[in-house]
Image (spheres, rainbow, N blue to C red):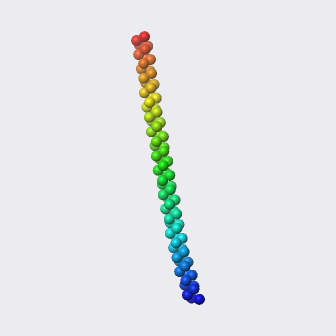
Amino acid sequence: MRQSLADWERAFAREASLDRRRRDSLRRTAEQRTLKREVERRHKRGSVRFVLLVLTLIMTAAIVIVAMFRTLYLLLG
């Protein structure tokens, strides 16, 4: 009886150790996924901001060119 109780205790300790390792592994995996998602979101937001900046610069240049030629037309015409 004592030997089987000792076996039960060892098995329990082994299972508890395995369970702790599994939980730590799952936690690390979840943290890595969270960080990866955050980096992807940050990259996507940066790309959108860059596109908006480029479009703003192009529109500004177009407006300035149109205004300049209209002013030239009015002054010379």
Q: Position of residue 67 (x, y in %)?
A: 44, 21
Which quadrant is home to the C terminus? top left
Question: Which residue ends up furthest to the bottom in the rendered image?
Answer: 1
- For this orientation, the residue located farthest to the right is 1
The spot of residue 66 in percent (x, y) is 45, 21
Q: Nearer the viewer, residue 11 or 77?
A: 11
Q: Residue furthest top?
A: 77
Give the answer, above or below, for where 35 lies relative to 11.
above
User: Is 62 placed above or below 32 here?
Assistant: above
Q: Residue at x 54, y 74 (%)?
A: 16
Relative image position of residue 51 (x, y in whole percent) = 46, 37
Place of residue 49 in the rendered image (x, y in percent of width and height, measured from the top left):
47, 39
Image quadrant where one finds the N terminus: bottom right
Vertical order, 71 against 15 (above or below): above
Q: Residue at x 49, y 58 (%)?
A: 31
Say how many tags the image has.
0
User: In the figure, is residue 1 to the left or right of 21?
Assistant: right
Residue plotted at (45% across, 25% down): 63
Image point 50% across, 60% down: which residue? 29
User: From what the image shows, is residue 6 above or below residue 30?
Assistant: below
